[in-house]
Image (cartoon, rainbow, N blue to C red):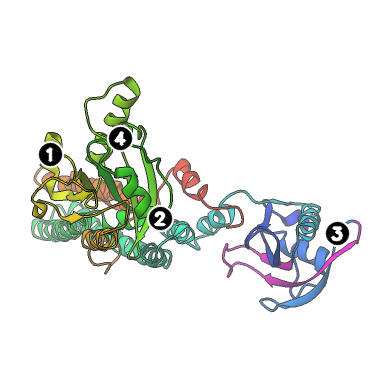
Amino acid sequence: MATASTPSAVPHDTIFALSSGGGRTAVAVVRVSGPAAGIALERIAAPLPKPRFAALRKLRHPDTGEEFDHALVLWFPGPKTETGEDICELHVHGGRAVLAAAYEALAAVPGCRPATAGEFARRAFDNGKLDLTTAEGIIDLIDADTDAQRRQALRQASGELAALYEGWRRELIEARMLVEAAIDFSDEADISHLAETNGLARAASLAGTIKHHLDDGRRGEIVREGFRIVLAGPPNVGKSSLMNALARRDVAIVSDEPGTTRDILEARLDLDGYMAIVADTAGLREAVGAVEQEGIRRARRRAEEADLIVWISDATAPSCELAPDFATSTARTLRVLNKIDASGMPSMNRTAFDHTISARTGQGIAELVTALGAIVRNAIGSDDGPAITQIRHRRHLETCLDALASAQAAGDLGTELAAEQLRLAADALGRIVGRIDPEDILDEVFARFCIGK
């Protein structure tokens, strides 16, 4: 039978938390990780079960001996566990009183305390059980709202992105070793020159691969964060009505009074499996007050940052032209003519518009949604191969690419400078997977986890 270590051997705290869903449930899983996990299980649900086999036990408070549940318990001795530490689990009945009793019993074991957000995952990272990109993939998998987000997060959580960057990092280390070998054999010109040339050639080849990886149209970030769509146009063209029609709920207030929408309102849509964030903005005109002026300023700024501008025109208005400052954005602008159901509509060329709709009656809305889904799919393109999903990844990849360019330039100035730039490039890739990272970056990543994960 496996035995647990003694309390005096505990090097740091043992943590516990609910790792299943909150609220009243049929079964709730309380996870315990740390050097006192076996001690806790022995004191609450003795005897310690066979490792990795479920056993039915009566659970008792370790001090009072009061029985508080009959439950399945599991014992996972480290280091071959999710966190790399000893782990036990209590599969208790999911009532609030039972959970409260389980927490109280665990807290009574010396060295045990409630876990903080992301502490289980942080211990797994510290013990080499997962890298930083895998941890971020797990977070994204938990937060996934669409099929595309789920697929991308699952690939990253499975280590696909880490394998790519680790492979590149190893290539850079090997290239650096060749360049440093040129320094060691500087008294043998032929060998030195060949080693340096080969090392820099390998680095240059990898630089082209990384540049291609960066030139991806932000597809991974768009899948993760959402394709940004802005509804823009003059006042009273039906932007808010279209927003409500797309969201299928009352997101925005609809009124005939111009300037009703002052601030930016957002709704999340699932467009053919992809996340889109649609923003309703203030009508663009000469503002009549300070508040409306600020709303228009925000609308213009949001449109500048958007992946797609849906410019809405009023079929009953005498003019349907784009605002002058939007003329340069036509490549990412979809022109929509609204209120086609209105009587007395002036004669105009509907072919100037990509879509004609009535947000009030729903005419043309389904076709518009289909078109928006196709635009999002085309913007993201193929999901083959790992994608950059975080601004943090992109920043470090750009740093790596800059260092590789400097290494090529430094080759004419000194072999030592080239080797140093290759070291900086490899370090940049190491920061993506968490091999080289300041503590505050790690804290920021793992704080995004929920408690119990």
Is disc 1 placed on a helix, strand or loop? Answer: loop
Q: Are marks 3 and 2 in contact (CB under 8 Å)?
A: no
Residue at 19%, 55% (x, y): give it.
356
- Labels 4, 1: front one: 1
- Which sits earlier in the primary sequence, circle 4 or circle 2? 2
The residue that mark 1 highlights is 319
- Res 255 label: none
- Which residue type does callout 3 highlight? Pro
3D distance between C-alphas at marks 3 and 2: 54 Å
Q: Can residue 50 be seen in this view?
A: yes
The residue that mark 4 highlights is 282
3D distance between C-alphas at marks 1 and 2: 29 Å
Q: Going by the image, does 26 lie left or right of 354?
A: right
Q: Can residue 415 be seen in this view?
A: no
Is disc 2 placed on a helix, strand or loop? Answer: loop
- Labels 3, 1: front one: 1
Q: Nearer the viewer, residue 394 or 278?
A: 278
What is the number of callouts on the image?
Answer: 4
3D distance between C-alphas at marks 4 and 1: 19 Å
Magenta-highlighted residues = 64-92
> Residue 377, relative to residue 314: is it above or below?
below
- Which residue type does callout 1 highlight? Ser
- Circle 2 residues within 10 Å: few <14, some 14–19, many ≥20: few
3D distance between C-alphas at marks 4 and 2: 20 Å
The residue that mark 2 highlights is 248
- Which sits earlier in the primary sequence, circle 1 or circle 2? 2
The residue that mark 3 highlights is 62
